[in-house]
Structure formats: C-alpha cells, structure tokens
Image (cartoon, helix red, strand yellow):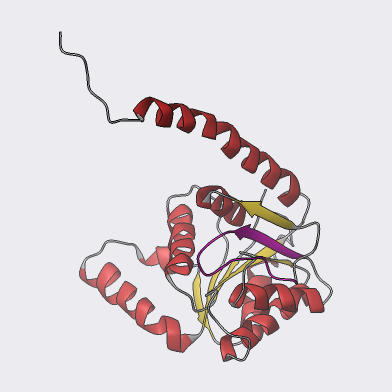
Amino acid sequence: MREEQHPKGWNEKKTNDSWAIFKIMGEFVNGFEKMSAIGPSVSIFGSARTKPDHKYYKLAEDVAAKIVNAGYGVITGGGPGIMEAGNKGAHLAGGTSVGLNIELPFEQHDNPYIDSDKSINFDYFFVRKVMFVKYSQGFVVMPGGFGTLDELFEAITLIQTNKIEKFPIILVGTDFWAGLMDWVKSTLLDKFENISAKDLDLIHLVDTSEEVVDILDNFYKDYGLSPNF
C-alpha cells in the first residue's frame, strides 16, 4: 500500500498548531479577567493613520471625553491615530481608558493614554475582537480602513444572527460613511434583498459628539448602564 505523502515539515506544523491552543486559551483567560472588571464601556474604532491635526482625530477625542462624562469607559485598539484620540479624550476627561493592543504594520506600539492596568496585548485578531464585542455597550466607528470595516461588519453580523445582545452602532462622519450606507440600502436591501430593513435599525449616522451620547443614552435609558456580560 502506497504511503501517504505530506509536505516537508507537516508533522512539526501539526504539533505546533496543537500547542497554539494553550496560547489562545491564555489570551482569552487574561482578557476575560481584565475586561470583566472595567464596567460599562464603549469602543471607538478608526484609522491608525489619522494624524493629530486631522478633524476626525479631534472629533474622536471630543467624542471620547463626552462618552466618559456620560458615565461610560472607552475601549480602543490601543494604537495611534483615531485609537490614540479615543484614549486621549477618555484619559484627559478622567475616565476609564482601555487599550486592546496588537502589533500591526501601522501600529507599532500602544499609545500613552491607556490606563496602566488596562493595556492588554494580543497576538490573535479573533481573540481581540471577542473582547471588543463582549465588553462593549456600543461601537463608535470613525473613518478607517479595512480593519475598521471588518470590526463594523462583524458586529452587525453577530447582532443580525442573534449571537450577541443588541447595542448601538454609531458611524461618525457623514462625508465618509454616506456612500457606503447608500449602497447598503440601495443594493443589499432594495435591489437584491440580501438583508432586512430591521438589520439597519441599530446603525446610526452622525456628525457630532453630542449625537453620539444622545444615541447611547436613549438606547440604555430603560435599563441603565448595565454591562452586557
């Protein structure tokens, strides 16, 4: 009987993949232990490339400060750009500032505005995304790239399929998001009927920090700031 052939190094890779389970478990345990203690918080997403003098950096900073003043903490991806602005706004307003860090080509280090006991490092994207979804009372999505879109659509998908509890998803910046939302409504909803109208109920398009806080407060006014975990 002919012996089954495998690529060189296959057995070693198979063993390494098995041992990776323990590293993944460790990231989940560390993340759960730290995140479960932070209280109700809102995640802010956006581009790592946004400079401090850009209007959306300044707006993200203001959004974060107002979120903190409304009684929430702020969670970001811990890097530069919009993430730094979110942590900076929360930090300067005296609120909880959490950073879920991962090493990426344009995010070489965590920003300096994360609370020292709330900076968590991840090697695995999927573990990091679980923490965002599980421990957030809302997503504030600033202009960003593929990573921002990935986090946005994953949250929408999980809510749509009832895998997580509903929470508000707030897109900040009409000039950035309007084209995407027009396409979603005209193509996905109206033309091809690939989604239902109710799938869009929790998505809000705004331009100001005041609108962000109003949406969060209106969503949670009936049952307070109870964490969703």
- Identify the magenta region: 97-112
Q: Is residue 35 left or right of residue 1?
A: right
Q: Is residue 138 left or right of residue 154?
A: right
Between 63 and 204, the one nearer to me in the picture = 63
Q: Residue at the spot x=58%, y=90% of the render?
A: 54
Res 167 quadrant in image: bottom right
Extreme front residue here? 8
Image coordinates for residue 99, horizontal then vertical, percent: 68, 62
Between 101 and 73, the one nearer to me in the picture = 101
Q: Is residue 5 above or below residue 88?
A: above
Res 77 quadrant in image: bottom right
Our reading of the magenta stretch's main secondary structure is: loop
Extreme top residue here? 1
Q: Is residue 92 above or below residue 222?
A: below
Image coordinates for residue 117, horizontal then vertical, percent: 80, 56
Q: Is residue 130 above or below residue 78?
A: above
Q: Residue at the spot x=74%, y=61% of the render?
A: 225
In the image, is residue 101 part of the stretch drawn in magenta? yes
The N terminus, quarter of image: top left
Image coordinates for residue 37, horizontal then vertical, percent: 78, 50
